[in-house]
Amino acid sequence: MFLKRIIKDEFALISLFFPSKKGISVLMYHSVAHNNVFFTVKPEMFEKQMRYLKNRDYNVIKLSDLVNLLESNEELPKKTVVLTFDDGFEDNYTNVFPILKKYNFPATIFLITGLVNREMNNSQNIPLRILNWEQIQEMHQSGLIDFQPHTVNHQEINKEEIINSKKEIEERLNKKCEFFAYPRGVYNNEIIGILKNNGFKASRTVENGKINKGDDLFKLKRISINSTTSFIQFKASL
Ligand SMILES: [Zn+2]
């Protein structure tokens, strides 16, 4: 069964888009490093962004906290942000983790389990290394980093890809995985059904926008932060 519905490219530009002030921003990062990949944020810029959140008293909450708020249909708090990182690049350990520890900010990493300790290629043909299990364990044990499945191979999305990536993280980290991120933003009702039948509570798309009360938990929007995001745009996206 192949999916017909393709939403948007995962790395689509947001530069022309200024979301409203209302709602919670789920920020979507990929790599934080000095490479020339489109989705990559420079470490200096990432630090500047996190420092801004800290200095301006933004509340950085866990994805699970946001899901609990939506499930209970409560009013969403203001000045609140969720940090997510897609794919699980090794620089999330070397460049992101120290900064998150410094500011005590929680984050979710959507991991491609089949690429652990291997390289992932991209459309620009600049392969980037994915985390290894030792690094993943250390980040998990810090209590700050929540690993969640993002399929095994980041190719097709089907029941096997979903369940096997979930299982591997659950077994290796001895935790329960309840959140998913659609690779390249591809999903349909069948995929949502598979997630619901296999213990998932929510899933993040690559559609632009903030989260508001009443939003569909399996169609959570996000705001992409990438190499094209200026600091002014970052501030405007909160
Ligand atoms: Zn991805």
Image: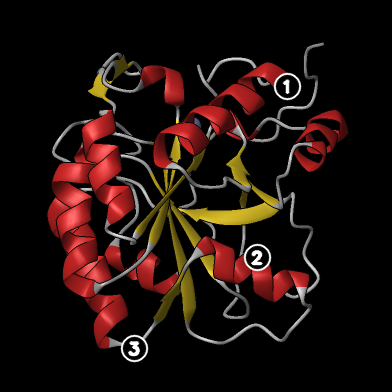
Task: Identify the mark nearer the N-term, 3 or 2.
Answer: 3
Q: What residue type is labelled 1?
A: Lys
The residues tagged by marks 2 and 1 sit, at their Cα atoms, a distance apart of 23 Å
- Image location of residue 226, percent across then percent down: 35, 47
| Figure label count | 3
Q: State left or right for residue 49 relative to residue 180.
A: left
- Image location of residue 141, percent across then percent down: 29, 53
Q: Can residue 131 be seen in this view?
A: no
Residue denoted by label 1: 159
Ligand 1 neighbours mark 1 (CB distance < 8 Å): no
Task: Identify the mark nearer the N-term, 2 or 1.
Answer: 2
Q: State left or right for residue 153 relative to residue 225.
A: right
The residue depicted at 21 percent of the width and 31 percent of the height is 36
Q: Which of 39 and 29 is in front in this view?
A: 29
Q: State left or right for residue 202 relative to residue 131.
A: right
Q: In which quarter of the image is the N terminus?
A: top right
Q: Give yes or no for contact between labels 2 and 1 (Cβ–Cβ under 8 Å).
A: no
Task: Identify the mark nearer the N-term, 3 or 1.
Answer: 3
Residue 190 lies in what quarter of the image?
top right
Q: Which of 197 and 88 is in front in this view?
A: 197
The residue depicted at 25 percent of the width and 28 percent of the height is 132
Q: Is residue 222 visible?
A: yes
Q: Give yes or no for contact between labels 3 and 1 (Cβ–Cβ under 8 Å).
A: no
Residue denoted by label 2: 67
Q: State left or right for residue 135 relative to residue 2.
A: left
The residues tagged by marks 3 and 2 sit, at their Cα atoms, a distance apart of 21 Å
User: How has the structure been colored for display?
Assistant: secondary structure
The residues tagged by marks 3 and 1 sit, at their Cα atoms, a distance apart of 41 Å
Say few, some or many: other residues with alpha carbon within 10 Å of mark 2 (under 14 / 14 to 19 / 20 or more).
Answer: some
Mark on residue 57?
3
Q: Which amino acid does label 3 sit on?
A: Asp
- State which mark lies toward you, 3 or 1: 1
